[in-house]
């Protein structure tokens, strides 16, 4: 009887953790982030989850001539304690949905936004 009830009701802790972490993953010593970018914001900041598979970031730079991408790399490098060269946009260079690779991110920054 317990097996029949287990599939009903609230999601298990493992399922909830998997859904919460669907927007990031480890790839060796690098962190891969799936982001939704809002350019032209009043300030650079982590804004919160966006759907089940992305995290929303607000970036102050306008989406012109790569300025928002450059600011995104600067912001993430500072927040994760890596050089700007350690942040690469590996998908979505010309859109709002991006995949970003951060090489060897600092643990404190990961804990701050809840991605450890």
Image: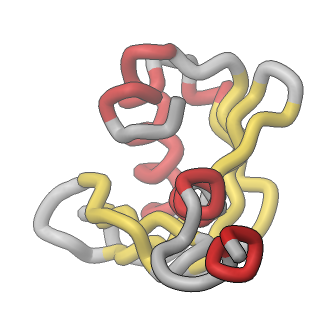
In the image as oriented, which residue stretches furthest toward the right? 28
Nearer the observer, 36 or 1: 1
Q: What residue is shown at x 25% (from left), y 53% (from top)?
A: 45
Coordinates of residue 69 in the picture (x, y in percent)? 53, 59
Nearer the observer, 49 or 17: 17
The answer to whether 79 is drawn above or below residue 39 in the figure is above
The answer to whether 96 is drawn above or below residue 2 in the figure is below
The answer to whether 45 is drawn above or below residue 94 in the figure is above
Q: What residue is shown at x 35% (from left), y 74% (from top)?
A: 39
- Residue 20 showing in the rendered view: yes
- Residue 78 showing in the rendered view: no
How many labels sit on residues?
0
Nearer the observer, 74 or 31: 31
Q: What residue is shown at x 71% (from left), y 76% (from top)?
A: 1
In the image as oriented, which residue stretches furthest toward the left? 42
In the displayed structure image, the side of residue 82 where residue 45 appears, left or right: left
Coordinates of residue 71 in the picture (x, y in percent)? 42, 51
Location of residue 11 by image quarter:
bottom right
The answer to whether 82 is drawn above or below residue 99 in the figure is above
In the image as oriented, which residue stretches furthest toward the front? 1
How is the protein colored in the picture?
secondary structure
Nearer the observer, 17 or 91: 17
Coordinates of residue 94 in the picture (x, y in percent)? 67, 79
Q: What residue is shown at x 49% (from left), y 82% (from top)?
A: 9
């Amino acid at each position: 009887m317990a097996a029949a009830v287990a599939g009903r009701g609230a999601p298990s802790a493992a399922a909830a953790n998997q859904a919460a972490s669907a927007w990031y993953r480890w790839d060796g010593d690098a962190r891969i982030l799936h982001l939704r970018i809002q350019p032209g914001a009043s300030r650079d900041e982590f804004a919160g989850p966006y759907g089940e598979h992305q995290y929303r970031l607000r970036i102050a730079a306008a989406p012109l001539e790569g300025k928002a991408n450059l600011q995104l790399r600067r912001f993430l490098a500072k927040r994760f304690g890596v050089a700007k060269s350690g942040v690469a946009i590996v998908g979505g260079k010309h859109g709002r949905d991006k995949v970003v690779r951060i090489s060897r991110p600092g643990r404190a920054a990961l804990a701050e936004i809840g991605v450890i």
